Image: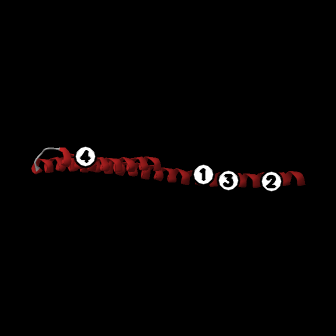
């Protein structure tokens, strides 16, 4: 999970860096008017915002799934613990019963 998070963070950083480099390149080399350049930058910013919103949605979905799995795991662990405790209690009671029977047989 941590590795996926690191990869996503790294991807986001590189995306933002590429967005910045692209914007600077567009300003320096594109023979456009200021108005056209602003439109291009606005569109690029919109695409960047859409990308970030999509990644945030993905992250929320993943967090929800992780939360659900953790809850299921906690429930299953609790059930296993209770079953083990009950089994140990039953085995202890069975052992005590067998020990009492053994004593009665030996005493005759």
Of marks 4 and 3, which one's residue comes earlier in the chain?
A: 4
- The mark found on residue 22 in the picture is 4
Of marks 1 and 3, which one's residue comes earlier in the chain?
A: 1
Of marks 4 and 1, which one's residue comes earlier in the chain?
A: 4
Q: Position of residue 95 (x, y in %)?
A: 75, 52
Give the secondary structure at mark 3: helix
Q: Which residue is mark 1?
A: 83
Q: Which residue is mark 3?
A: 88
Q: Residues within 10 Å of mark 2 (few under 14, many from 20)?
A: few
Measured in 3D between alpha carbons, the distance from the residue under mark 2 to the one under mark 1, in whole angstroms, is 24 Å
> Marks 3 and 2: which is nearer the front?
3
- The mark found on residue 99 in the picture is 2
At a point 23% along the width and 46% down the height, the residue shown is 25
Measured in 3D between alpha carbons, the distance from the residue under mark 4 to the one under mark 1, in whole angstroms, is 61 Å
Give the secondary structure at mark 2: helix
Q: Nearer the viewer, residue 63 or 32?
A: 32
Q: Nearer the viewer, residue 70 or 28?
A: 28
Asked whether disc 2 touches disc 1, contact meaning CB atoms under 8 Å apart, the reply is no
> Marks 2 and 1: which is nearer the front?
1
Q: Position of residue 20 (x, y in %)?
A: 27, 50
Q: Residue extending furthest right? A: 107
Q: Position of residue 55 (x, y in %)?
A: 32, 48
Measured in 3D between alpha carbons, the distance from the residue under mark 1 to the one under mark 3, in whole angstroms, is 9 Å
Q: Residues within 10 Å of mark 3 (few under 14, many from 20)?
A: few
Residue 3 seen by the camera = yes
């Amino acid at each position: 999970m941590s590795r996926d998070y690191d990869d996503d963070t790294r991807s986001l950083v590189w995306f933002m860096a590429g967005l910045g480099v692209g914007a600077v390149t567009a300003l320096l080399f594109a023979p456009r008017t200021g108005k056209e350049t602003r439109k291009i930058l606005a569109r690029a910013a919109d695409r960047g915002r859409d990308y970030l919103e999509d990644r945030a949605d993905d992250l929320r979905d993943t967090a929800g799934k992780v939360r659900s799995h953790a809850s299921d795991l906690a429930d299953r662990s609790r059930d296993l613990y209770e079953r083990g405790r009950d089994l140990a209690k039953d085995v202890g009671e069975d052992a005590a019963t067998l020990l009492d029977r053994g004593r009665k047989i030996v005493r005759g």
